[in-house]
Amino acid sequence: TLNKILKTRNQQLCSTLEWLASLGGNNEALVNTCDASTNINTIMDYLQETHCKDRKPTNVLQLRSCTFDEDKEDFCGFYKRFRLKICENLKKRGHLVRASSDEEMDYYLEEDEI
């Protein structure tokens, strides 16, 4: 029935809001934002502004700028350039990998990524 579906949805939304509020620890502003918000976009905007303002978009292996232009090169040339970009970014044995903010989780690569 519709009432059962709405009740389940509201319980799930409540759980999600509680989880989001817990991300801020004792951050009263985040808890208040979660309590007062009527949509998830407001909460996500708040989190973005307060927790992610210094982060830049990820450019995995710097491949975002590697595009194919059929007027300037053939597919084989693009493939070679694309493959070179990937190989340039792979790490070698002994590279320190920062797993998290906890230094105990960091490790050194035991072999090349190639």
Image (cartoon, helix red, strand yellow):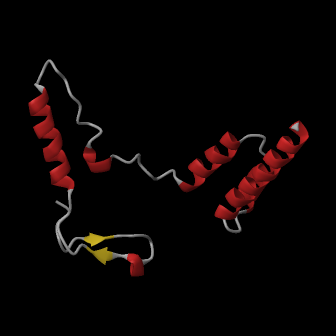
Question: Can you say which quadrant of the picture contains the C terminus?
Answer: bottom left
Horizontal side of residue 105 vs 8, given as left or right: left
Dividing the picture into quarters, in which one does residue 111 lie?
A: bottom left
The residue lying furthest to the bottom in this view is: 104
Question: Can you say which quadrant of the picture contains the N terminus?
Answer: top right
Residue at 19% x, 74% y is 94
Residue 33 screen position, x and y as percent = 75, 51
Residue at 68% x, 47% y is 43
Horizontal side of residue 79 vs 34, given as left or right: left
Q: Nearer the viewer, residue 46 or 112?
A: 112
From this view, report whether residue 57 is shown above or below residue 25: above
Q: Nearer the viewer, residue 88 or 101?
A: 88
Residue 7 screen position, x and y as percent = 86, 46
Q: Nearer the viewer, residue 77 or 89?
A: 77
From this view, report whether residue 64 is shown above or below residue 103: above
Dividing the picture into quarters, in which one does residue 73 lie?
A: top left
The residue lying furthest to the top in this view is: 71
Count of numbered tags: 0
From this view, report whether residue 98 is shown above or below residue 84: below
Residue 60 screen position, x and y as percent = 32, 49
The residue lying furthest to the front in this view is: 1
Residue at 19% x, 23% y is 69
